[in-house]
Amino acid sequence: MADTTTSPTAGATADARRDALADRLFGSLNATFDLAAVYLGDRLGLYRALADAGPSTSTELAERTGLVERYVREWLEHGAVGGLLDADGSADGTSRRYALPAGHDEVLLDEVNPAFLTPFVRMVAASMRQLPAIMDVFAKGGGVPWSDYGPDLREGQGAGNRPQFHHLLGSDWLPSIPDVDARLRSDPPARVADLACGEGWSTIAIARAYRGVRVDGIDLDDPAIAQARRNLATTEVGERVAFHARDAAEPALQGRYDLVTVFEAVHDMSQPVTVLRAARQLLAPGGTVIVVDERVAETFTAPGDDIERLMYGFSLLVCLTNAMAEEPSVGTGTVMRPDTLRAYATEAGFQAVAILPIEHPTFRFYRLDP
């Protein structure tokens, strides 16, 4: 007999389970419309205009953003009814003023605040656009390549991870690995390769934290590297950071780096063993590889917690389809459990694989030594 003791509906009647599911999906409908409204407010500059100007009428906000008043008014009313915005209840129609509540700016607008969630809304929007293509690969096989998801997914991932890298990478994560931290602070200056660097915020954060190191951000995605270079141009570390759209397995790169990092990317790879093998070959004597990937449960459990649900959602709509777009593919998906990463690393030739004691709600940290 199946064990249902972990289910919140264990022992419930069919009617109760029906009603619970109906309530859950009804709440999800409202949550989905909230995400759509946040997407519009972000991409159309409505939140920024409200934050900059303060309480505004729909006419004022429409004029400020160059948008159509009637649509702006509907967006404002939706936000106020749902608690995303504040509204002056004593006025009506176009005379009513709306404002961004205190603290909401940190979630919706502050690009380096740990509470910043707007980029993830962009990622969800990008993934939902691909539902017809995902239906097709369910039936025919293959996958949906990363490039098909467009800039909302690429830029959303870069912006979503940026606050973590900005606040924690150089002040907490790497300093908690004593020998790695010491090498990055010593002479001669260390060299770091940041593989699958995306838009480069992890690469930039390493260079900012360690004033002597030289860091190469390496990625096969040309648009991401182009944006990484634009991001770099806004910083003070341009002389010590370079971004390359190239394959990390190129022989010219072998043996050059004291540290190789891979942030939140191994689970997306069609051939992770090949990439990890290339990472090992990049190392100079005494070097190490740090992999940061999703903190999923160590074993499958149903039902799972909110983080597990989130990771399976991204896997279903983005990560698995992206990995399966290249053949052959091991088809890892977002939910890469520790034993899976250990198996990949061992096959790639690493002699030691350890989970580092770094606490984070969504990331798990691995050290791979050759």
Image (cartoon, rainbow, N blue to C red):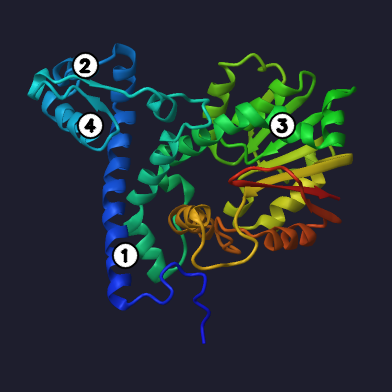
Considering only order in the chain, which callout, 4 or 2, is on the residue closer to the N terminus?
A: 2
Q: Which dot, 1 or 3, sits closer to the camera?
A: 1
Residue type indicated by callout 1? Ala
Considering only order in the chain, which callout, 1 or 2, is on the residue closer to the N terminus?
A: 1
Considering only order in the chain, which callout, 1 or 4, is on the residue closer to the N terminus?
A: 1
Q: What's the mark number on residue 56?
A: 2
Residue type indicated by callout 3? Asp
Residue 226 horizontal/vertical position (percent): 53, 29
Q: How many marks?
A: 4
Between the C-alphas of marks 2 and 1, the distance is 40 Å
Residue type indicated by callout 2? Ser
Q: Quadrant of residue 122?
A: top left
Between the C-alphas of marks 3 and 4, the distance is 39 Å
Indicate left or right for 171 with 16 as reference: right
Considering only order in the chain, which callout, 4 or 3, is on the residue closer to the N terminus?
A: 4
Q: Quadrant of residue 336?
A: bottom right
Label 4 belongs to which residue?
80
Q: Quadrant of residue 167?
A: top right
Between the C-alphas of marks 1 and 3, the distance is 42 Å
Q: Which dot, 2 or 1, sits closer to the camera?
A: 1
Residue 109 horizontal/vertical position (percent): 41, 25
Q: What's the mark number on residue 172?
A: 3
Q: Are marks 2 and 4 in contact (CB under 8 Å)?
A: no
Label 1 belongs to which residue?
20
Residue type indicated by callout 4? Ala
